Image (tube, helix red, strand yellow):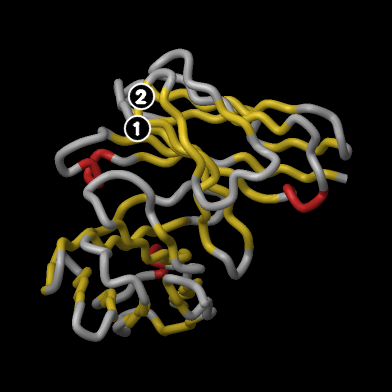
Amino acid sequence: EAQVTQNPRYLITVTGKKLTVTCSQNMNHEYMSWYRQDPGLGLRQIYYSMNVEVTDKGDVPEGYKVSRKEKRNFPLILESPSPNQTSLYFCASSLAEGLAIETQYFGPGTRLLVL
Amino acid sequence: QKEVEQDPGPLSVPEGAIVSLNCTYSNSAFQYFMWYRQYSRKGPELLMYTYSSGNKEDGRFTAQVDKSSKYISLFIRDSQPSDSATYLCAMSRDSWGKLQFGAGTQVVVTP
């Protein structure tokens, strides 16, 4: 079954404690990205990756890091989380050419609360 | 000003009614226009997409794009309680890559 998985699904942490949210896809997609979803603001892109070792900033990259060492995995790292990073996070993947929109999948989301 | 504006609702309709959703945008470079459905505690799933202007129909769903007015719409005919969800519009310059989302409209279809 084609899918994007995220872990953990729910996380409560404290300010300054480093955390990693994992994302994995089984569709051999080149393009992967992270979004955060906040009420009234919709989904905003944090970082994206065109392929292994190729990453770039989205609209709201401050306070986040990513890495793409393997094609299937795209972890999101919060080195020093702050309360304004409390949000719902989604990982997405798709092909990187052609009608990639048709191939796009979103993960189930990770709800993060930073105290 | 946001690039994509969408009324957050909620929009409540009786079962069987037509649901009408819309978004406006400011960036004329957008070429691909998408509608996503998001159920509570789930990730968005692509419902329909349209390239450039025009209409597209898929079962009970119709998507319309008017690039001259920078306005897109989604219509759901014969709405069902299972259509209750948040509907997000999204736009992109390319067929892949960064999506610019609206805030989402919550739709409630009451039996």
SS for tag 1? strand
Nearer-the-camera pick, B81 or B69: B69
Q: Are marks 1 and 2 in contact (CB under 8 Å)?
A: yes
| In this rendering, position of residue A70 left or right of residue B8 | left
Disc 1/disc 2 C-alpha distance (Å): 6 Å
State whether residue A3 is above or below residue B109.
Answer: above
How many residues crowd around disc 1 within 10 Å: few (fewer than 14), some, or many (20 or more)? many
Q: Position of residue B44 (x, y in %)?
A: 43, 51
Point 48% across, 81% down: residue: B11
State whether residue B7 is above or below residue B97.
Answer: below
> Does mark 2 fall on the same chain as mark 1?
yes
| In this rendering, position of residue B68 left or right of residue A15 | left
Q: Amino acid at mark 2?
A: Asn
**Tag 1 subunit:** A
Of callouts 1 and 2, the N-terminal one:
1
Q: Amino acid at mark 1?
A: Tyr
Nearer-the-camera pick, B70 or B21: B70
| The label number, if any, that marks residue A31 in the structure image | 1
Of the 4 image quadrants, the one containing the C terminus of chain B is: bottom left
Give the residue at mark 2: A51
**Tag 2 subunit:** A
State whether residue B43 is above or below residue A81.
Answer: below
Q: Position of residue A54 (x, y in %)?
A: 41, 25
* Quadrant assignment, res B10: bottom right
